[in-house]
Image (cartoon, coloured by chain):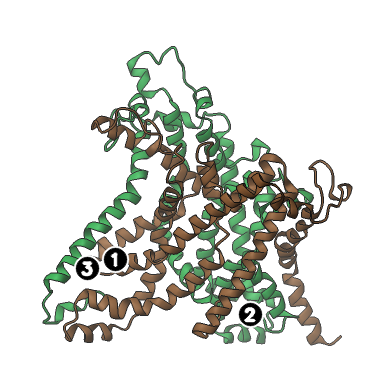
Chain colours: A brown, B green
Amino acid sequence: MSKKKIYSLKLFLLVLPFIILVLLFSYYPLYGWMYAFYDYKPPKTLSNCPFVGFKWFESLVSSETKVQQIIQVLKNTFAMSGLTLGTSWLPMLFAVFLNEIRGVKFRKFVQTVTTLPNFVSWVMVYSIAFSLFNSTGMLNSLLLKSGVIDQPILFLQSSSHVWFTQWLWLTWKNLGWAAIMYIAAISSIDDEMIQAARVDGATRMQIIRHITIPSLLPTYFVLLVLNVANFLNNGMEQYYVFQNAFNKEYIQVLDLYVYNMAMGSGGYSVSVAISMLKSLVSVVLLVIVNGASKRIRGESIL
Amino acid sequence: MGHSNEKGSTIKVSAGDRTVEIVCYIVFSIAAFLCLYPFYYIVINTISANDLSAKGDILFWPQGIHFKNYLSAFRIDGLLRAFQISLMRTVIGTALTVFASAFLGFMFTQEKMWLRKFWYRLIVATMYFNAGIIPWFLVMKTMHLTNNFWGYILPAIVSPFNLILTKTFVESVPKELQEAAEMDGAGVLTVFFRIIIPVIKPIMATVAIFSAVSQWNAFQDTLLLMTDTKLYPLQFVLYQYLNQASSLASLAQSNTSTSSLAAAAATTQTTTSVRMTITVIVVLPIMLVYPIFQKYFVKGIMIGAVKG
């Protein structure tokens, strides 16, 4: 073997341990999809469980109640993702108007304070929600004192407006952080263009509409496309910590449903089957939106 | 940008522009209040008289200030251990992730590596697919990483996002630095430790801070992997307390016989005081670290945005 070849292999061997980690923790779980084709019962190993083919996939559409349940879960998923997608312009607006504030100190303060919630975990957010909105929490105490109500309202145990309140929490946590990218993009806008517009007598709103926002749209579009690709991936942490017996019907998104099915009722195989379908749909979505992005903007996002 | 350049110009601010600015000030003040008040509310409740905070009487300023809650919090069964677990996973996890990201970021700029592009893509591709949590849990179980501290650490070591960050940064380092060192006979590892690490420290700080926050905040991996209470981190213990409010009172070192006295009632632990005190203990490190390292976060998200 030539010296060059040996050196090139040596470089590879140095990264090999890390590649093995990636194979183990990101690729090997794909092998876990096998469980969807077996009747897996936890204490046994997979080889001791009977092969059942597509039984679990068929079971998803076999009974009326099952179909009802899955439709509700899909509704929840679509509603939560839809709300996020429909308001995905909010961070852009946040950045644009924050930029209109002249006081640098105030601007920095707002930026720091509004990005803070992004760095606390969902458990923390739930703890905060609990403190503010439980029966002796801030809001109830305030409403009781002012005589608006005479019985505490159980906000967190309510089954109404679940989609909306979950969207509110998500926005509270993410808005400031999501705006940072736009804030940075605004600072790279050509200043002369804005000056020229101003000399021509443009008002602030006109500058925002005709210069600032158009120059932010490419960033917005990329993020929007990624959002679409992640339509089915809401994650489960937020919904898991907020779920309770009262709101369960409306809070179960696909990711949480998969978890509850497996860990709650031991239906490992069937939940792997759902996971599998979900992952496949996500990859297809990603390929489609990436293709669309290439077509429309001549630019791939991957 | 903005109005900073306007001082020298002769253009007057129109009434409409003025209104825009006033509305902005009001809206952003409300936004800042909404983000800050919940934290403030919890903090003032933990240092106020516990009987008042349990009734929800503490709304805007603390009353009957005392700090007993923080002293007694660490006497709660299991809390100190949870704190140690949180700290250990944050420190070990961060150290390994930072090293792996820096090393891989550098190695994947080495064009001579065998199948370099393929391996790089193999890692980055994991950003875009996901087997799902249950398949992940099942293979973690077959690898005996359930109820095992390393289950927190090993899966997090290689992160495609961090790899992209560091590789982008290493690419901006002049190639001549490495070439000059190699002329002097330095091997690839010497180049990495002596030449590269000192120049990529800023991006290592960014990776460190992202990694530390995600380790400190992690909750889902405990939920999936751990049933051994000895391995529960703070986040998980707090979650349990939130859900078992009734058993809380017995966990707290409360003494019912003295709680009838008004003075004792103010410092006797209640479910509310315990819950809020733990919340502050868990949030505090983030509150302290975040403003200092904000610029690193911003840098991280910017590089990620350009590349991602």
Kindly report the distance in space between the C-alpha atoms of the residues bearing marks 3 and 2: 43 Å
Q: Residue under mark 2: which chain is it in?
A: B
Residue that carries the numbered disc 1 in the rendered image: A98
Q: Position of residue B182 (x, y in %)?
A: 66, 84
Q: Amino acid at mark 1?
A: Leu
Residue that appears at 61% across and 48% down = A68
Q: Are marks 3 and 1 in contact (CB under 8 Å)?
A: no
- The spot of residue B16 in percent (x, y) is 15, 70
Q: Position of residue B50 (x, y in %)?
A: 37, 26
Residue under circle 2?
B109
The three-letter amino acid code for the residue at tag 2 is Thr
Which is more toward the observer, A5 or B264?
B264
Name the quadrant of the C terminus of chain B: bottom right
Q: Is residue A192 left or right of residue B129?
A: left
Q: Left or right: where does residue B299 sit relative to residue A237?
A: left
A284 relative to A154 in the view: left or right: right
Residue A292 lies, with reference to residue B71, above or below; the image says below
